[in-house]
Image (cartoon, rainbow, N blue to C red):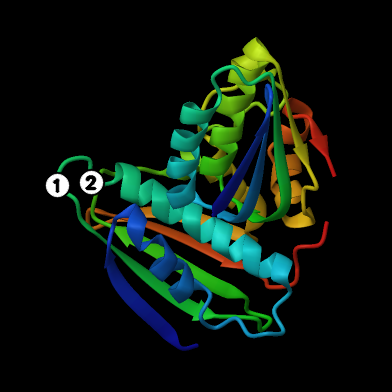
Amino acid sequence: MKTDEVRIEAKVENLPAVIAFATETLTGRCPPRSRMHVELVTEEIFVNIASYAYPETGGFVTIRRSGGEGPEGLTLTFIDGGVPYDPLQKPDPDLTLPLEERPIGGLGVFLVKELVDEVRYENKDGKNILTVRTIIGNDEE
Amino acid sequence: MDIKKEKNGTTLTMALSGRLDTVAAADFEKELNASLDGVESLIFDCADLTYVASSGLRAFLMVQKRMNKQGKMVMRHVQDAVMEVLTMTGFDDLLQIEK
């Protein structure tokens, strides 16, 4: 399967470019709901990296993309060389807490886990590598 | 995201259109902080809001907490795509939503 790659500075203002790259292989036949899920997953992962991976120095993210609407799904891999961080270790937020006790934050990773078909993290050669796979159009409840 | 404000006495209506992503959420929070003094009824018209990320949810959570102290807040005409994210995160129980 063809893999494309982009390397981009981990800054929130690069979000539109990152979303454009992540969704590039999706066609007009892609259900809008599936496209929205891919955009949301991409945003939550990229913004997390942009906000926390490089607290002082700034740095880059490499994003790899393969597949699309086919049966193999769309696979996106986010690689950064920042602070080692496994977002999947974070406990899910308690969605039953009343408003006043709801913590601000913690929802992004939860949304990623809910919206993809497969997610895995590894730390290799000092890099955070987060891979998500989504089967397009397979998100009906 | 575009925000159109309309104030009528102590009622403020904000019509939100476009995408409430992380970039937009920062501006949205600033706009809210500057607009809510003396507001007792806050209405978000979400008819043209097509997308919300967790940063946008955070903004809604903050403004709901504030409005609980000074009045009420309601979201109207919420689209399916936005509603799905609100439901998935349990925000449909925290916020007053009219579809």
- Looking at the image, do the residues carrying marks 1 and 2 touch, with CB atoms under 8 Å apart? yes
Badge 2 density bin: few <14, some 14–19, many ≥20, Cα 10 Å = some
Q: Give the side of residue B11 with respect to residue A122, left or right.
A: right
- Give the CA separation, mark 1 to mark 2: 6 Å
Q: Chain of mark 2?
A: A
The quadrant in which the C terminus of chain A is found is bottom right
Amino acid under disc 2: Tyr
Q: Secondary structure at mark 2?
A: loop
Q: Nearer the viewer, residue B36 or B82?
A: B36
Name the spot of residue A93 as percent of width and height, x first.
Answer: 60, 30
Badge 1 density bin: few <14, some 14–19, many ≥20, Cα 10 Å = few
Name the spot of residue B15 as percent of width and height, x first.
Answer: 66, 46
Amino acid under disc 1: Thr
- Residue hosting label 2: A54
Numbered mark located on residue A22 in the image: none
- Residue hosting label 1: A57
Name the spot of residue A99 as percent of width and height, x first.
Answer: 66, 19
Name the spot of residue A71 as percent of width and height, x first.
Answer: 68, 81
Q: Give the side of residue A53 with respect to residue B26, left or right.
A: left
